[in-house]
DNA sequence: TAATGTGAAAACCTTCACAGCT
DNA sequence: AGCTGTGAAGGTTTTCACATTA
């Protein structure tokens, strides 16, 4: 499931380039993955290809889009209009993909009422009503870590079905709410492991800790 | 490796809360994972716990930090100072974790020279010299999709060792460069699959497409 | 008693290899 | 000839279950 959107993106590109048909091998080269992986993934959802030819770009794109629900407009709201929240609301990449931010909320009374882009910041107490009335399904959370779980609990109560969380926490949600986290610091921290030893040598930092107990870095 | 930073964060929290010792079970509850998983993960790097008691928070935190290289200061640069780049450079979460943005670059001559926070935007031609001189190891890429691969190729030439990519592309890098992607749209698209059917029913959208060929959503 | 560390089992995911279609 | 779709093989990750130790 995490790879399907990747295929969609590559196919859009191919379409823009005017390519009509693509093989699993060509797609694999673009996305740095094996053709077998791509075929297996696609075969899970149907038989989209033609043996001896490949996949029709247009057709496959359409099919994958439907499977993922990219043909639907997804009503979305933003919680937290600090620096990060403002950057998100001004990011031009969401709307073209069908993710429309219809409302923005903040718990800071100083923020409430201020206009951002085409909408004005609402107080948290309006959350439930707005989510229901405007049929908002997805929430984007951009509040400080300390408030994140509380905000997410409120969202869950409003029957939000998906949450894109930017706060650096691991929130608890019921199983029927889909959660995705965006956390650049975690991403950085998970890469330093692979950078560590080489850099350490260069720096000749004299820390003679008893490392070497752990296994060798399995460099991708 | 992707989970270790999660443990570090949970442990920091526990430390801040004044907890001395934690069991795999307690940690698991916080992070929504099985105790066995946590024990296996940790045992891969050493024997950090005490049977019958659990793990000393302070000690485990220290050990994991060293394994991940969080005790090192990582010199970092930013490429692209548009809206997104500016948000990144102003994000206060990197520096406390040891990721210092020491330089910013942009290919737009109009941007070059403008001051942002404590540094001034440099032209791309300075990249190699600055990266070398200031011992920059990690680059954060926040340029438009169309330029991303080109910029990343330049970074690779400068012997950058890690790249945090915000551009919505799947860049190609040599095996010895560590790449992490931040892509909120992909995250959203990978969650809509699980939201689709229910919402569709509600909306009573009359699209009577022949779905149902695919398997049922295997939630999470 | 309470929890770790760890072999073994189970589950899951990826790759192989080839029959079969165009 | 060229490429898909797919069982089977191979590999990796997770969970189980328990001996061991504080």
Image (cartoon, coloured by chain):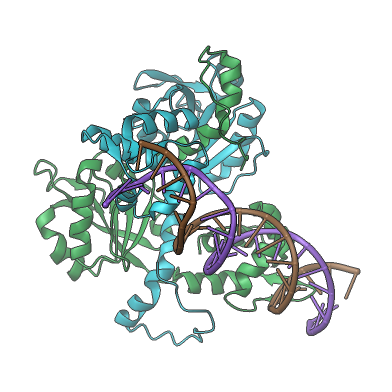
Chain colours: A cyan, B green, C brown, D purple
Q: Position of residue B104 (x, y in %)?
A: 21, 53
Residue A158 picture quarter: top right
Judge whether A209 appears above or below A148 on screen: below
Judge whether A142 appears above or below B14 on screen: above
Residue A118 visible here: yes
**Nearer-the-camera pick, D4 or B94:** D4
**Looking at the image, which residue is at 51% across and 79% down?**
A215
> Taking A178 as reference, is A50 left or right?
left
Judge whether B44 appears above or below A46 on screen: below
Q: Position of residue A24 (x, y in %)?
A: 36, 47
**Nearer-the-camera pick, A57 or A73:** A57
**Looking at the image, which residue is at 30% across and 44% down?**
B167
> Taking B108 as reference, is A136 left or right?
right
Quarter in which the C terminus of chain A is drawn: bottom left
Judge whether B148 appears above or below A205 on screen: above
Q: Position of residue A125 (x, y in %)?
A: 59, 21
**Looking at the image, which residue is at 73% across and 70% down?**
B54
**Nearer-the-camera pick, A108 or A11:** A11
**Image label count:** 0
Residue B76 picture quarter: bottom left
> Taking B149 as reference, is B11 left or right?
right
Q: Position of residue B194 (x, y in %)?
A: 57, 34
Residue B104 visible here: no
């Amino acid at each position: 499931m995490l790879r399907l959107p990747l295929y969609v993106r590559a196919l859009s590109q191919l379409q823009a380039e005017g390519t009509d048909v693509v093989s699993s091998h060509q797609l694999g080269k673009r996305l740095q993955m094996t053709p077998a992986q791509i075929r297996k993934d696609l075969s899970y959802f149907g038989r989209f290809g033609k043996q001896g030819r490949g996949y029709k770009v247009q057709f496959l794109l359409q099919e994958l889009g439907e499977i993922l629900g990219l043909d639907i407009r997804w009503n979305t709201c933003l919680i937290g209009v600090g620096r990060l929240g403002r950057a998100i609301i001004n990011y031009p990449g969401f709307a073209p993909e069908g993710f429309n931010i219809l409302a923005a909320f903040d718990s800071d009374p100083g923020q409430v009422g201020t206009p951002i882009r085409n909408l004005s910041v609402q107080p948290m107490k309006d959350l439930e009503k707005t989510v229901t009335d405007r049929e908002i399904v997805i929430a984007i959370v951009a509040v400080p870590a300390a408030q994140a779980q509380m905000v997410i609990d409120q969202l869950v109560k409003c029957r939000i079905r998906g949450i894109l969380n930017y706060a650096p926490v691991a929130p608890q949600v019921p199983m029927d709410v889909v959660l995705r986290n965006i956390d650049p610091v975690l991403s950085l921290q998970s890469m330093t492991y692979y950078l560590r030893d080489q850099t350490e040598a260069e720096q000749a930092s004299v820390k003679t800790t008893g490392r070497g107990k752990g296994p060798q870095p399995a460099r991708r």
